[in-house]
Amino acid sequence: MHELSITTKLLNSALSTLEQNHGSRIFSINLEIGAMNDCEDKWLFKYWDQLTEGTAAKGAALNITHKPFVFKCKNCGFEFEFDPKTTVNCFCTMCQSSELTMISGRQFDITSMEIE
Ligand SMILES: [Zn+2]
């Protein structure tokens, strides 16, 4: 399952950050997930509960912020958000060009953590 590997990666990354900071426990994690990752919170929370059992992250709260796709138009330079749920074709909303660069949407970042 897609969410399981994402959650495993998240936990490993959180635990190594904890170690680097010589902490012993994680209380909460603030997370930014780009639309590209296409993951559902309920699965993340479910796997998080299972995987953190017996680790320093047990009981830690996950605060997830979902980040939309952001594209930049190669033609006119306009930047805009894109929601694949409501829009099928992706064109620049200014000039209708389809020559676009994705500048946001792939991220899966821990922005901050509360540890002890
Ligand atoms: Zn454009």
Image (tube, grey):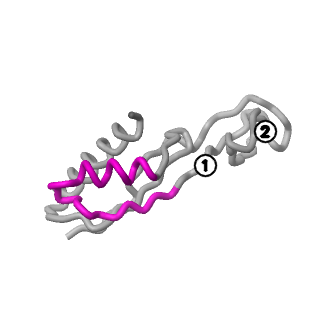
Q: Amino acid at mark 2?
A: Cys
Instruction: Report if the beta carbon of the residue with label 2 is closer than 8 angstroms to ligand 1.
Output: yes
Quarter in which the C terminus is drawn: bottom left
Q: Residue 107 appears at what percent x and percent y? A: 47, 44
Seen as rendered, the residue at the extreme top is: 99
- Which element is circle 1 on? loop
Is residue 54 within the magenta segment? yes
Query: Mark 1, residues whose alpha carbon is within 10 Å: few (<14), some, or many (≥20)?
Result: some
Residue 78 relative to residue 22: left or right: right
Between the residue at mark 2 and the residue at mark 1, the CA separation in whole angstroms equals 15 Å
Residue drawn at (32%, 65%) of the image: 28
Range covered by the magenta-colored residues:
42-65
Q: Is residue 81 magenta?
A: no
Residue 36 relative to residue 29: left or right: right
Residue 41, compared with residue 116, is above or below; it is above
Residue 53 placed where, x, y %?
20, 54
- 44 up-or-down from 2: above or below: below
The residue that appears at 27% across and 68% down in the rendered structure is 27
The residue where tag 1 is placed is 68
